[in-house]
Image (cartoon, grey):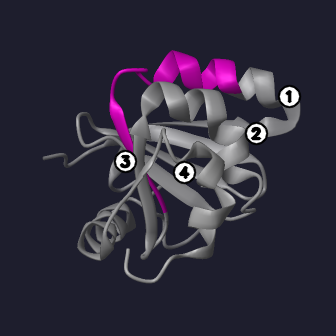
Amino acid sequence: MSNQHWRIEELKHHSKDISWLDASEASQAYTLVGLYDSKSHLGLNAQTVDSIERLELDEGISTATDWLRLRISGIQELVVVFGEDDCFRCSGNFFVENWSDIFVPARDDAMAYSPESSIILFYCHENEFELGQRIVFD
């Protein structure tokens, strides 16, 4: 990334576990998740995402971590997309174990997907997750 985004500074304590995408890769990731983002509500698009599951985080961080652990393979790569210029790669295991630190400080909506499988995830700043399978997946 040519101009360092504020989120890089916010998450620098995870720098050994995450790899920030360059401008071209970030733009591609942002465009990709846009295909699966609902245009009518906060969450995933039921027209392009199948088997959508929803979790409200009222139960606490450990319950959400357990929920994610059952759905995300620890060995797969994930791409986390906050916006068109702040996206990073990480392992599924890192994501599951650190999601609350990744998302809570930013207080933003975000999406994550795996380039290795059809999984897609939406995190809402109102403490909700949606997870599903991309219908069209290359």
Q: Give the residue at x 48% y 65%.
A: 38
* Residue underneath mark 3: 49
Cα separation between marks 2 and 1: 7 Å
Q: Please, is residue 133 above or below residue 47 in the view? A: above
Which amino acid type is shown beneath numbered disc 3? Val
* Residue underneath mark 4: 122
Q: Nearer the viewer, residue 3 or 21?
A: 3
Disc 2 and disc 1 in contact, CB within 8 angstroms: yes
Q: Earlier in the sequence, mark 3 or mark 4?
A: 3
Q: Earlier in the sequence, mark 4 or mark 2?
A: 2
Q: Nearer the viewer, residue 77 or 56?
A: 77
Cα separation between marks 4 and 2: 12 Å
Q: Give the residue at x 50% y 55%.
A: 111
Residue 119 image point, x, y percent: 36, 37
* Residue underneath mark 1: 59
Q: Please, is residue 85 above or below residue 14 in the view? A: below
Q: Please, is residue 91 above or below residue 3 in the view? A: above
Of helix, strand and loop, which one carries label 2? Answer: strand
- Residue 87 relative to residue 55: left or right: left
Q: Earlier in the sequence, mark 3 or mark 2?
A: 3
Q: Give the residue at x 62% y 27%.
A: 97
Q: Which residues are magenta?
A: 65-81
Cα separation between marks 1 and 3: 25 Å
Which amino acid type is shown beneath numbered disc 2? Glu
Of helix, strand and loop, which one carries label 3? Answer: strand
Disc 3 and disc 4 in contact, CB within 8 angstroms: no
Q: Quadrant of residue 2?
A: bottom left
Which amino acid type is shown beneath numbered disc 4? Phe
